């Protein structure tokens, strides 16, 4: 498969989208919060009705905009170079921001902060 499509109306941080980006697929997703955060660096992307927006890591379409989704799919099917560029951009973004090492480091930092707070609480109770 060359294209991944996630036409959700509501979504958190989609594991399916993360996985598709990780393996370098060009992605089309609806312009909702979790998807937008992965596809675009812009906080509030405005997508025209019946259209789509191409970003470095994928394409955004409006939820319930069947015409825009169809146009985005046709665009990627017809444009191999763009498909490849979007796939590379998506993969690079995931490697830089969601690698297993990076996620593990974030958890370690979180646990250390929690343990430090518990230690501080225990010290204040002992006094």
Image: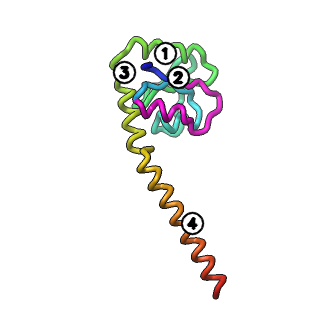
Q: How far, Cα to Cα, is label 2 from label 4?
A: 38 Å
Task: Name which quarter of the figure residue 124 lies in.
Answer: bottom right
Going from the N terminus, do you reach mark 1 or mark 2 first? Answer: 2
Identify the residue shown where x is 52% and y is 18%. Answer: 51
Percent position (x, y) of residue 121?
62, 76
Q: Which badge, 3 or 4, is on the more N-terminal residue?
A: 3
Residue at the image position 42 percent from the left and 26 percent from the top: 25
Q: In this view, does 13 lie above or below 107?
A: above
Say if mark 2 contacts mark 4, CB within 8 Å: no
Q: Nearer the viewer, residue 1 or 47?
A: 1
Q: Mark 2 points at which residue?
A: 5
Query: For the residues marked 3 and 2, what is the alpha-carbon distance in whole angstroms?
Result: 15 Å
Mark 1 is surrounded, within 10 Å at the Cα level, by few (under 14), some (14 to 19) or many (20 or more) other residues, namely some
Region in magenta = 5-23
- The residues tagged by marks 1 and 3 sit, at their Cα atoms, a distance apart of 12 Å
In the rendered structure, are the residues bearing label 3 and label 4 in contact, judged by CB atoms less than 8 Å apart?
A: no
- Give the image's coloring scheme: rainbow
Residue linked to disc 1: 73
Label placed on residue 114: 4
């Amino acid at each position: 498969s060359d294209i991944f499509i996630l036409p959700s109306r509501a979504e958190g941080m989609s594991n399916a989208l993360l996985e598709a980006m990780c393996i370098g697929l060009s992605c089309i997703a609806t312009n909702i919060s979790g998807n937008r955060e992965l596809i675009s660096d812009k906080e509030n992307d405005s997508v025209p009705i019946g259209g789509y927006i191409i970003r470095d890591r994928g394409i955004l379409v409006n939820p319930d905009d069947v015409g825009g989704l169809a146009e985005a799919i046709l665009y990627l099917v017809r444009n191999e170079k763009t498909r490849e560029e979007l796939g590379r951009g998506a993969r690079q973004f995931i490697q830089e921001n969601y690698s297993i090492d990076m996620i593990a480091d974030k958890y370690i930092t979180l646990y250390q902060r929690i343990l430090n707070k518990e230690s501080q609480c225990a010290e204040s109770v002992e006094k």
